[in-house]
Image: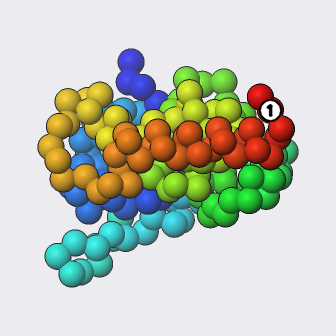
Amino acid sequence: MKRLLLLDADVVIDLHSLGLFEKICRAYEVYVTQEVYGEATYFKKDGSKNPINMARRVTIIRNVDLEGLEKVEKETKEALLVIDPGESTSIAYINQTDERMTFCSCDKAAMKLISYMELEQKSISLERALRDIGYHKRNLYPRHYEKTFKTAVNEGKTLRIQFKKLV
């Protein structure tokens, strides 16, 4: 059975520009929220805009709870972070679902919020997701690195201690 992977728009766009989207789709059962689907419409390669047509390759999530979105909005404000609607709906969904799904984002604020909300065990760096399926080339961007992910997670933990007064 394939592992379930929920992608953020930046990851979808980057995977297309790197030519790795099909590889991810073959290895994982890929999901995106409706908002991410709307955000990830094209990618740039060799100076031209190329359309992203992923409707047949991914499952589009349309049922994110309003309460979950409100919680993400509250936690985002509390942590003094700013994230876009695709990240908000993805984090709300990963928080609400009982499925064994993993969220993959390369946005630093989203990664911090995941940790702030104690959801880091339900998230993964793009580098790690690719390494887990045997991809080891060094053509990724720094925002995809496991090191970048871990740094953001640690910063989110610091914010959680700072703003939630937890020890």
Q: Residue at x 83, y 38 (%)?
A: 165
The residue that label 1 is drawn on is 166
Q: Is 102 left or right of 113, judged from the image as shown?
A: left
Residue shown at the point (29%, 78%) measured from the top left: 49
Task: Give the farthest residue toward the bottom.
Answer: 47
Residue 4 percent across, percent down from the top left: 46, 30
Dot 1 falls on a residue whose secondary structure is loop
Q: Quadrant of residue 93?
A: top right
Residue sitting at x 45%, y 52%: 106
The percent coordinates of residue 39 (x first, y second) are 51, 66
* Residue 51 quadrant: bottom left
Q: Residue at x 32, y 41 (%)?
A: 127
Q: Is residue 28 above or below residue 69?
A: above
Q: How many marks?
A: 1
Q: Nearer the viewer, residue 126 or 53?
A: 126
Judge the density around disc 1: few (<14), some (14-19), many (≥20) Cα neighbours within 10 Å: few
Quadrant of the image containing the N terminus: top left
Where is residue 68 drawn, in percent x and y?
78, 43
Q: Is residue 80 shown above or below 121?
A: below
Amino acid beneath label 1: Leu
